Image (cartoon, grey):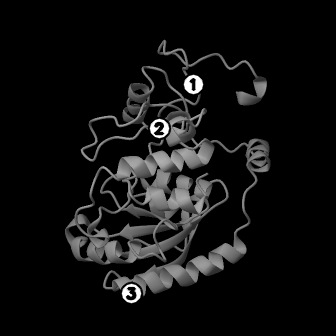
Amino acid sequence: MFADEDFIKASRKFVCVRIETYESKDSEEKVRALLGGAFANTAFCIFDPEGKERLSRAGRGPSMVLSSRGGRGGQLRGDAGVIQRMNQIAANYKTRGQKADAVLQDFNSFRQALNVASADQRLLVFLNAEEKKRQSVEAELRKAFSSTDVEGKFHLKLKAKGMDESWVKVVRGASKKPGILIIRAGTFGLDGEVLKRLPLSSSANEIKAALLVVNESFASLEDRKIYRDHVTSGRRQGIYFENEIPYGEDRDGDGKIDNQRRGRRR
């Protein structure tokens, strides 16, 4: 469904917030709040523009929350029903401001951004600049990332002081010199490689042009991952991405991770 053009078009009418479930205690609490105390690897809900009032019930994903099984009252079934309901909700609110002024995407840490970029198989754009020098650069990034040719195709991380200082240790071709870096994440998101570096003085058009050129090359080199094969390969190689919250689910909401009954899910 997430690859459906109609779904993508509908999603543009919303601010999409992605919670990395196991990243932190704060993330765990958000998921538990959505699922009535239970804890699962995914949760979904639609809020009003203030992020306070729930406009839908909460569940594991859009299909569980928005689709209509019976197709009553003109409501479509399945994925089409989800898209229809999203458009109905969005129609109640008018967009204010311009796309080029939208808040930029960001992650809590470079480490998490690299891992997500690998999982999603997108290039990661990393702004390596001190906060006091970022205002003009971010303005150009907003213009570039709001372009129809660019939006939704890349992940973006703004360097966080104190938290992202060790990023250079896991990225080949990296240096501490300020710049806008386009990074290809490794197979398991534990390392990466700088494919191109742009100066902080780059204009929105220059940034956009570079992104499109590098992405075209990236698309020709990056083989799409087959989930089962990817997981099997990671297990064989002993790959483990450690998060603050231990992996597992608490579906009964008793505050403890449920017993893993199948050995393959250790």
**Whether residue 99 can be seen here:** yes
Residue behind mark 1: 249
Earlier sequence position, callout 1 versus callout 2:
2
Residue count near mark 2 (Cα–Cα under 10 Å), binned few <14, some 14–19, many ≥20? many
User: Relative to the observer, which residue lies in front, 217 or 238?
Assistant: 217
- Secondary element under disc 1, as helix, strand or loop, is loop
Residue at image coords 52%, 42% = 74
Please rate how many residues cluster around mark 1, counting C-alpha atoms within 10 Å: few if below 14, some from 14 to 19, many from 20: some
Q: Amino acid at mark 2?
A: Phe
Left or right of 243 on screen, residue 235: right
Alpha carbon of mark 1 to alpha carbon of mark 3: how far? 45 Å
Looking at the image, residue 123 sits to the left or right of residue 90; the answer is: right
Q: Secondary structure at mark 2?
A: loop
Quarter of the rendering containing residue 171: bottom right
Residue on which the image places disc 3: 205
Q: Label 3 crowding class (10 Å Cα cut-off): few <14, some 14-19, many 20+?
A: some
* Front: mark 1 or 2: 2
- Is disc 1 in contact with disc 2, using a CB cutoff of under 8 Å? no
Q: Position of residue 112 (x, y in %)?
A: 48, 50
Q: Residue at x 41, y 87 (%)?
A: 206
Q: Residue furthest top?
A: 254
Position in image of residue 152 (x %, y %): 49, 65
Q: Looking at the rendering, in which quadrant would you find the C terminus? A: top right
Residue at the image point whose x is 59% and y is 57% from the top: 120
Specify whether 25 is left or right of 124: left
Q: Amino acid at mark 3?
A: Asn
Sequence order check, earlier mark of 3 and 2 = 2
Q: Which numbered disc flags the more N-terminal residue, 1 or 3?
A: 3
**Residue 193: assigned label:** none
Which residue carries the number 2 mark? Answer: 44
Foreground residue among 97 and 185? 97
